C-alpha cells in the first residue's frame, strides 16, 4: 500500500484524537482497536506469536536472547511466566488477541 497505516492508527489512539462517534465506529469493527496494553507489550507479544505461529517454534525454545526486530522476546516471555501476564485490561472481558 505504501501508506504509513501504523502511524495513522497510533495517532488515532491518542487521547482526544477522535470524536466519540468515530471511536465508537472503530470499536464496532474491532473492540481492541485501541488496546489498554502498552505498545511495548504488544510488540513483544506479536514477536512471540510470530515465532510460534509463523516460525514453527515451540514456546520453550524462545529463551532469553531470542530477539524479533531487536526486542528480546525470550526475556519478555520468561518475565510473563514468572510474574504472570503484565498485560493490563480495560475490563474483565478484555484480553490480548488470541491465536
Image (cartoon, grey):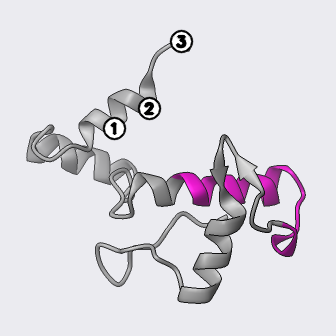
Tell whether label 1 touches label 2 (CB within 8 Å). Answer: yes
Q: Which residue is mark 3?
A: 2
Instruction: Assess disc 1: are there few (<14), some (14-19) or many (≥20) residues with their C-alpha within 10 Å of its C-alpha.
Output: few
Residue under the image location 54 percent in, 86 percent down: 84
Residue under the image location 66 percent in, 71 percent down: 77
Q: Which mark is residue 6?
A: 2
- Is residue 90 positioned above or below 18 on the image? below
Q: Which residue is mark 1?
A: 10
- Is residue 74 positioned above or below 3 on the image? below
Apparent side of residue 5 relative to residue 67 in the rendered image (left or right): left
Q: Nearer the viewer, residue 28 or 55?
A: 55
Q: Is residue 14 magenta?
A: no
Element at label 3 = loop
Q: Nearer the viewer, residue 56 or 78?
A: 78
User: Bounds of the magenta span?
Assistant: 43-61
Residue under the image location 27 percent in, 34 percent down: 11
Q: Assign the C terminus to one quadrant of the image.
A: bottom right
- Earlier in the chain: of badge 1 and badge 3, it is 3
Label 2, label 1: how far apart the Cα atoms are:
6 Å
Amino acid at each position: 500500500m505504501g501508506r504509513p497505516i501504523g502511524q495513522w492508527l497510533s495517532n488515532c489512539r491518542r487521547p482526544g484524537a477522535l470524536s466519540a462517534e468515530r471511536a465508537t465506529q472503530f470499536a464496532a469493527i474491532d473492540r481492541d482497536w485501541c488496546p489498554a496494553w502498552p505498545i511495548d507489550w504488544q510488540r513483544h507479544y506479536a514477536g512471540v506469536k510470530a515465532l510460534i505461529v509463523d516460525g514453527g517454534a515451540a514456546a520453550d525454545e524462545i529463551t532469553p536472547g531470542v530477539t524479533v526486530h531487536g526486542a528480546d522476546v525470550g526475556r519478555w516471555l520468561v518475565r510473563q511466566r514468572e510474574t504472570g501476564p503484565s498485560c493490563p485490561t480495560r475490563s474483565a472481558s478484555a484480553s490480548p488477541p488470541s491465536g
